[in-house]
Image (cartoon, rainbow, N blue to C red):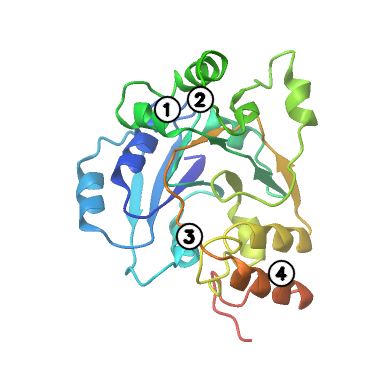
């Protein structure tokens, strides 16, 4: 196997099925699937047990004791059988060449970072209800934008630009502004081990699973490289359960001041 695709989920079977269905269309087949569940929902287990996987898969669970995504991700990293780790969230459906592109640009000294296309409720439902598949989504979104009132956020991210095409220079020009997105990133097991994994001090969503990684990878000397318009994911519509980020941002600033890019409460439990 060339890579481990780690999918972070919490309870949503319909979204997970849309993601797994899209994986049948991946141009690169040589990867394992790790479903990293921040909980242990019996309905999720039953669905996974009967799903027709094409790749080797592993379903990891933990007790549902509030937001502990980072703990679940560290468990997935330890369980991964390959050296290249690709991460998506349980509400993001990958483009058919998603795994291929993350592997194409893999480098143990580089952190690969992509963006996401925000899909409307109507188009999301078409994917979930299997009325269109991942091969049709790009054309569908373009038609919706041109001929209807439906607007797609970050539509520019939906254009796949092949590294072999004459337009490949466009993808090279696009930079990764801001921090990593946990729904579309990849790196080596060696790289994440250098900073001791995801920081489990974060007990609320946002910041801890991506922004925190960004400055810690930079502090450890890793370069972040964009794979925008190469590795694409489509973010399915759902109501946002907005959580105030102030506590996490304060914690992140404190750790930055301490230059603690190697976290204490991570893959290994280090002495403070």
Disc with the residue nearer the chain's start (4 vs 3): 3
Q: Which residue is mark 1?
A: 123
Label 1 vs label 3, nearer the camera: 1
Q: Which residue is mark 3?
A: 73
In whole angstroms, how far apart are the C-alphas of marks 2 and 4?
Answer: 42 Å
Q: Residue 22, relative to residue 59: is it above or below?
A: above
Packing grade of label 2 (10 A; few <14, some 14-19, many >=20) is: some
Q: Secondary structure at mark 4?
A: loop
The percent position of residue 223, horizontal first and vertical second, equals 77, 50
Q: Which residue is mark 2?
A: 150
The percent position of residue 187, horizontal first and vertical second, equals 62, 49
Q: Which residue is mark 4?
A: 261
In whole angstroms, how far apart are the C-alphas of marks 1 and 2?
Answer: 9 Å
User: Does the residue at mark 1 contact the one at mark 2 (Cβ under 8 Å)?
Assistant: yes
Disc with the residue nearer the chain's start (3 vs 2): 3
Label 1 vs label 2, nearer the camera: 2
* Quadrant of the image containing the C terminus: bottom right
In whole angstroms, how far apart are the C-alphas of marks 1 and 4?
Answer: 40 Å
Disc with the residue nearer the chain's start (1 vs 3): 3
Q: Residue 255, relative to residue 236: is it above or below?
A: below
In whole angstroms, how far apart are the C-alphas of marks 4 and 3?
Answer: 18 Å
The percent position of residue 79, horizontal first and vertical second, equals 43, 58
Q: Quadrant of residue 169?
A: top right
Q: Secondary structure at mark 3?
A: helix
**For residue 200, which numbered disc appears in the image?**
none
The percent position of residue 209, horizontal first and vertical second, equals 57, 60
Between 195 and 148, the one nearer to me in the picture: 148
């Amino acid at each position: 196997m060339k890579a481990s695709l780690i999918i972070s989920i919490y309870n949503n079977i319909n979204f997970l099925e849309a993601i797994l269905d899209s994986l049948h269309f991946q141009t690169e087949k040589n990867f394992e699937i790790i479903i990293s569940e921040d909980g242990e929902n019996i309905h999720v287990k039953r669905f996974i047990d009967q799903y027709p996987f094409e790749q080797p898969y592993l379903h990891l669970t933990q007790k549902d004791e509030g937001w502990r995504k980072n703990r679940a991700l560290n468990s997935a990293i330890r369980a991964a059988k390959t050296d290249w780790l690709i991460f998506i969230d349980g509400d993001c459906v990958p483009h058919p060449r998603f795994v291929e592109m993350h592997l194409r640009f893999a480098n143990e000294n580089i952190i690969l970072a992509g963006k996401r296309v925000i899909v409307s409720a109507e188009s999301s439902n078409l994917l979930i209800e299997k009325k269109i598949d991942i091969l049709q989504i790009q054309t569908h979104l373009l038609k919706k934008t041109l001929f209807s009132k439906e607007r797609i956020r970050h539509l520019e991210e939906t254009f796949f630009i092949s590294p072999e095409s004459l337009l490949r220079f466009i993808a090279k020009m696009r930079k990764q502004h801001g921090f990593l997105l946990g729904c579309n990133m990849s790196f080596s097991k060696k790289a994440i081990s250098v900073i001791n994994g995801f920081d489990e001090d974060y007990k609320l969503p946002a910041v801890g699973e991506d922004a925190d990684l960004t400055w810690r990878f930079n502090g450890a000397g890793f370069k972040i490289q964009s794979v925008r318009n190469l590795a694409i994911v489509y973010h399915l519509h759902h109501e946002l359960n907005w959580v105030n980020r102030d506590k996490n941002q304060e914690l992140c600033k404190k750790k930055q001041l301490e230059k603690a890019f190697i976290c204490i409460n991570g893959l290994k439990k280090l002495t403070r």
